[in-house]
Amino acid sequence: MIIGITIPSLIALFGGVLTYGYINDIKNRQIILQTIDEIKESVLEIRRNEKNFLLYKNAEQFKNLNSSILDSSNSTNNISLMLADKIGLKKKNLLSTHINQYSGLINALNKNFQKEQSFSEAVRKEGRKLESSIANHKNAKELSTSFVLHIRLLEKNYMFFRDKESADKLNKSLLKLKNVTPLCYDCIPYVDAVRKLFGVYDFSDSIINDIHIIGDKLEEITGKMSFLETQKINSFISTTQRLLLIGIILLCVLGPLFVYKTASYISSPIKRLSVIANKISGGDITLRAPLKEKDETYSLAISFNSMLDNLQTTQQTLKESLDLLNEKQAQLIESEKRASLGFLVAGVAHELNNPLNNISLTAETINENAKDISAEETSNYIQDILRQSDRAHKIVNNLLDYARARKSEEMEKQDIINVVNDSFNLIRNQLKVNNIQLKKEIPDKVFFINGNRSKLEQILVSIIMNAVQSMKDSGILTVQVLPDNDTHILIKISDTGAGIAETDLKNIFEPFYTTKAPGEGTGLGLAVCHTLVDEHKGEISVESELGAGSTFTIKIPLFVDTV
């Protein structure tokens, strides 16, 4: 196993060391190339300023050109001996020599440009004299004004273009002037001035030609130096690529041969752990990984088994806690149901009083007038007693249906309109006792939901009970049932009671939170309602204003037939 890991590591290390060496050489060569590029850029800057100087021929351009020559000379002279050795000392000295020659030629050209200006001014001066002489008819008659003006035009073209064609045309006109008018004394100074200008221009052209030659050599030298360094860098990069490729091939060919044994040695116990993990994911956490001291996964197996022990203990504890929580939640729901049952009993007792009184009065009438009552009257009295008994029977049965603990927790298809009506029937008499007016806005239509009737009634009775307690001895209780986007049903229960403070609204669905006086509530009613509404995949919300009352809205999905 150690060999399988060590040999590929050595191959990678050897390749890495060689690659590092080549990359370091590339880094050094890049420094050299940067230096050469700086010199090359300074040479290009010289050539740009050279063109401007030749075009404008003024002191500012001469100053700029000399400044760029000085920068290039300093860059060349500041090359260290180490860099000069790598670049080539001969090339460096040759570059310095050409820069010095170039600088001397530029200075000479600048002096000659100054001569050109004075000579050009002399030509113009003699030309003006010649024009004046012709205008005053002081020379030969053969010399016309138009001819002289033509020569002056050729003179200006030559000064402007300075090309061979302009020079030839001006020279021919001068020869003609000399041959046609040999006795023109004012022509001789003009011709001599132009001849001197020819000489100065020729000398400037000669210097400019030398400048171009030296400038081209400077560009050629720096270009070759840059090209050679670029080639060296490319060569280093190619060598590095080849080394990396060789290293990758070695790793790809030899690596698997050495790693195979190691992988086989490690994969076997890992596969065992994988099989156990798959069985555990299926729910069987009683399995444990086998322990082998010489196994590569020995420590992993110990940690794995320890984790499973802790997981099993945690699962058992969590299951017990969940069972206890469900038990306590059921007890809380039942406790709240008993509390609402006590509220209903008070109304039912009052409601039972009427039929019982009727039965008692009817029985007393029969008892006192038994001899005087006919058989038909007796039958009527008995029928009245039976009706009143049936009425009392229904009142008690309704209460028993609500109070009876239902075993079923199943959600069934329920008519929510029927559930709402039955819930309000349970508290109808309680509303009368508390002088509360009931307003029902319930559509004459069937709406089905998937729910548990007992839990739905408990939700509605709990909210109604809170509303009655909020309104004290009088008020209006309004219930609305209306569809919401054909997907949900909304049940809104509104009262005209004291209302709920805005600071309390966010907490009213929390367990044991109550705004009632001590002894008037447990703080569980709305918390239980929230839980039961969640079980129906619904939502419950409240809007309230102090002194104006509250509106509870229950939103429950409509029944969807999946068949």
Image (cartoon, rainbow, N blue to C red):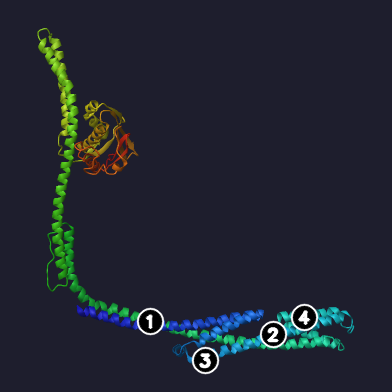
Depth order, front residue of 361/524? 524
Q: CA distance from mark 1 to mark 3?
A: 30 Å
Mark sitting earlier along the chain (4/2): 2
In terms of secondary structure, where does tag 3 sit? Answer: helix
Mark sitting earlier along the chain (4/3): 3
Q: Are marks 1 and 4 in contact (CB under 8 Å)?
A: no
Q: CA distance from mark 4 to mark 3?
A: 47 Å
For the residue marked with disc 4, what is the amino acid? Leu
Task: Write down the residue under mark 2.
Answer: 114
Tell me where residue 183 sits by quadrant. Answer: bottom right
Mark 1 surroundings within 10 Å by alpha-carbon count, few (fewer than 14), some (14 through 19), many (20 or more):
some
Mark sitting earlier along the chain (1/2): 1
Mark sitting earlier along the chain (1/4): 1
Task: Write down the residue under mark 1.
Answer: 23
Depth order, front residue of 1/193? 193
In terms of secondary structure, where does tag 2 sit? Answer: helix
The quadrant in which the N terminus is found is bottom left
Mark 2 surroundings within 10 Å by alpha-carbon count, few (fewer than 14), some (14 through 19), many (20 or more):
few
Q: CA distance from mark 1 to mark 2?
A: 55 Å
Q: CA distance from mark 2 to mark 3?
A: 32 Å
The percent coordinates of residue 26 (x first, y second) are 41, 82
Q: CA distance from mark 4 to mark 2?
A: 22 Å
Residue 93 disc label: 3
Residue 154 disc label: 4
In this view, the mark in front (1 or 2): 2
Res 284 seen here: no
The percent coordinates of residue 381 (x first, y second) are 15, 14
Please indicate whether residue 287 sits to the left or right of residue 68 in the image: left
Please indicate whether residue 36 sits to the left or right of residue 159 in the image: left
Q: CA distance from mark 1 to mark 4?
A: 66 Å
For the residue marked with disc 2, what is the amino acid? Gln
Depth order, front residue of 302/108? 108
